[in-house]
Amino acid sequence: MPYRRKFLKRAGYTTLSALLTMGFLQKDKQKEDGSTNAAPANYLSANVNSPLRQLAAAKGKRYGAAVSTDILLKEKDYADLIARECSIVTPNGELKWNATEPQPGKFTFESADAIAGFCQKHNIELHGHTLFWHMGKPDWLPYPPTLKMLERHVTGVMGHYRNSPVLKSWDIANEIIADSEKETDNPTYGLRKGVKRELIRDLFLLAASVDSSKKFYLNDFGIEGATWKSERFLKMVEYLKNSGVKIDGAGIQSHLWFSTAYGFDEKGFNSVLKRLNDLEVKPLITELDIIIDTPLPDSIKKLDQMVADSYKRYLDLCFAAGVDTVITWGITDRHTWIRHPDWIPGKTFRNNPSLWKFLRPLPFDENLQPKLACNAIAKAFQQAT
Ligand code: XIL
């Protein structure tokens, strides 16, 4: 399997057919109330001129985005936009193992520290992503790493940010749950091959021994509905809780697909959020971006409206369940990982470069102008109780 496909399958977007099989997406052309998933009248067209961070703060919430050091340093308009809109940011790759410990025991924090410095200057919180991931790892590192390797890494990286005035939370582990039964030896917890629940427990314990002043999250994708995967994810959260481990939140990545033909499993997602709240593990939206799948609308304008409408419906549901943090995976379509040739999602898009202009998953366009999706996020914050 080429690397790219492997990545898409394992670390970001699951394929449409897989999602349908998993029950994540529901075919609901015609819902009970007679409405469809097609774009409604444009109730999101009025621009909300306040920055998202301000609208979020008015409701005790936070808005943020994944950022990259090289772009922050190169593009002033991008840096200004992040400073204006975000109250929290996640490094796109700067805190992953391959960036922080490229050689065994040799740590480098230059790139990540540049983001931390930017955060301090602009009063932005920094979310630490991530200490443990099967991707974004140096070649020398096995997966899963040994406990000894984990100990050195966690001590080195968390230790470096122990006194940081901006870094307040860590994705202790990222994407530990397999995508399907076929990819796990562990039907109960669905962990990726080779990963034992006790190793994850020990990783959380290790993290707490280095710096328990931060919030600790377990982060994953494909859990935005009642799926095989979300069930295993919840079991794992429950196990960690019952083991007495410090776990404060669950990162729900939310790399989402919608189309005129299907929406998302609202009932199932509500139940995921409720179960997390019942476990006193706070749900957070950590990597939101939205793709519109085929059949594509006949204009960019309609597409943007669908993206916006999807943002609104998704966030309304999140806020009704008490979610207080929304982080989008990037902020502008100028720099979205899904337009990068390595990560173009799904066969249809991969094989048709002419369709790439329809990949418009983020709140600001290529010229850093707010799109309808930005209005949708703004309105969702405004209407949140
Ligand atoms: C992605 C980045 O955006 C890419 O630039 C990088 O090369 C690969 O990783 N889930 C995650 C993120 O948890 O870390 C991934 O980020 C996107 C999927």
Image (cartoon, rainbow, N blue to C red):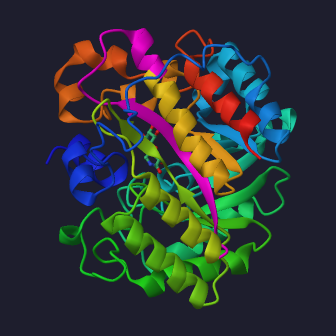
The location of residue 115, given as percent across then percent down, is: 70, 38
Q: Residue at x 73, y 43 (%)?
A: 384
Q: Quadrant of ligand 1?
A: top left
Give x and y (percent) for residue 197: 43, 83
Front-most of residues 235 and 335 = 235
Left or right of 149, for residue 264: left
Left/right placement of residue 4 relative to residue 195 reads left
> Is residue 285 in the magenta section?
yes
Q: Position of residue 315 (x, y in %)?
A: 59, 42
The answer to whether one can see residue 114 in this image is no
Among the 4 quarters of the image, the one containing residue 268: bottom left
Q: Which residues are magenta?
A: 280-305
Q: Residue at x 30, y 27 (%)?
A: 341
Against 329, is 351 above or below? above
Report which quarter residue 210 is drawn in: bottom right
What residue sits 40% from the left and 18% below the top? 303
| Residue in the foreground of this view, choosing between 63 and 377 | 377
Q: Residue at x 60, y 77 (%)?
A: 204
Residue 132 locus on image (x, y percent): 49, 64
* Number of numbered callouts drawn: 0
Which residue occupies the foreground of this view, 308 or 173? 308
Q: Is residue 211 above or below residue 97?
A: below
Point out the residue furthest to the bottom here: 243
In the image, 254: left or right of 106?
left
| Residue that sits furthest to the front in the current view | 33
Question: Magenta span has 211?
Answer: no
Using the image, determine if residue 44 lies above or below residue 112: above
- Residue placed most toward the observer, 16 or 182: 16
Residue 380 visible in the snapshot = yes
